[in-house]
Image (tube, rainbow, N blue to C red):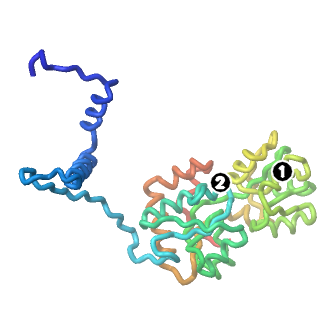
Amino acid sequence: MSEATKTEFNRNNPIDKQRNESKNMPKYASRLVLLLAASSFVLTGCATDATPEATTEEVTTEECVPAHPDLTTVDAGFLTVAAYEYPPFSAIDGESLSGAEGEILHAIAELECLDVMVQPGTGAAMIPAIESGRADTTLGSWYRTAARAEIVLLSNPVIIDQLTLISVSGVDSVEGLIGNKVGSTLGFLWNEDLENVLGKDLSLYETTQALYADLASGRISVVVDTFPSGQAALKNTPVGGAVFNVPAPDERVVSTTKPGQTNFPVNLNNPGLQEAINDNLDTLRESGVLGEIAEKWGFSPTAVAETVPNLL
């Protein structure tokens, strides 16, 4: 090109900008544009005998290959999850799940080329949904227990969860609970043991919001919860000066001697799904994905370390 015909490239010129974008367009996108242009040319009736016949180039996409091709779920193509709000373990975000266990289930579904279908409900409806076959699994800090193992299949441990005492006074032992007004949420395994120790000084709440509201108001002095659950609750209901303590093992409260292990339970008649979940947990653990998710939601990476399964 001579100096007389050379033109400078101007980034602010819309035509030059478009020209530059076309130059940098990925190859697959360029092929798609050419294909569409050729199709448009033919459809407008501009083709003549002298015009070469428009050719199409096949645009291929990588097909998803499930880790377990023979997997059976309630609805083909979906992993149906019975879900309720229990941050930071589980939360419902529109048509998807969030929270630590929610993100893990999405990662498992992706490995199996499945979409997640959310089936919202109350905490009390979660295990029955699995037992009856209405959902494939559930989430929200469901511990591996001997009683649950009789009605559903339990996956390998997902998150190791420790009983934590949360108070302004700094109570740090089961013995220290005696003489205080103590609160816990319905459904925790330690509630029966705490009732034996505290009697009428223990109050059980239907929601964590109500539990921490009473801690903030002074109606109770100590909350018995888990570390991540307490962290999440205090963001919504701040309690000035609240401190977290994991009590020393005390035989009176079994949960202090044997930490809970959360799991993704499945129907007794679907051992293939149980196996797939266990295999996928191993894959996600080895790749570091579990650790990244745990840290994102306020857990220690050790909370998702491989551990020997136990039953409470």
- What amino acid is found at the position of numbered circle 2 in the picture? Pro
> On the picture, is 236 further left or further right than 42?
right
Residue at the image point whose x is 62% and y is 60% from the top: 160
Disc 2 designates what residue?
A: 88
Q: Position of residue 180 (x, y in %)?
A: 91, 54
Q: Residue furthest top?
A: 3
Q: How many neighbours does mark 1 have within 10 angstroms: few (below 14), some (14-19), or many (20 or more)?
A: some
- Residue in the picture at 84% in, 63% down: 204
Q: Name which of mark 2 and mark 1 comes first in the sequence.
A: 2
Q: Contact, CB < 8 Å: mark 2 with mark 1?
A: no
Left or right for 220, reference 79: right
Q: In which quadrant is the C terminus drawn?
A: bottom right
Which mark, residue 98?
A: none
Question: Residue 89 is drawn in which quadrant?
Answer: bottom right
Amino acid at the residue labelled 1:
Ala
**Where residue 161 appears, x then y in whole percent?**
66, 59
Residue 42 location, quadrant? bottom left
In percent of width and height, residue 183 lies at 84, 58
Q: Which residue is mark 1?
A: 213
> Circle 1 sits in a helix, a strand or a loop, which is it?
helix
Label 2 CA crowd tier, 10 Å (few <14, some 14–19, many 20+): many
* Residue 91 position in % (x across, y down): 64, 57
Pick the front one: 131 or 298: 131
Residue 261 in view in this figure: no
Of residues 140 and 309, the one nearer the viewer is 140
The residue drawn where x is 67% and y is 63% is 84
Give the alpha-carbon distance from disc 2 to disc 1, as whole Å: 18 Å
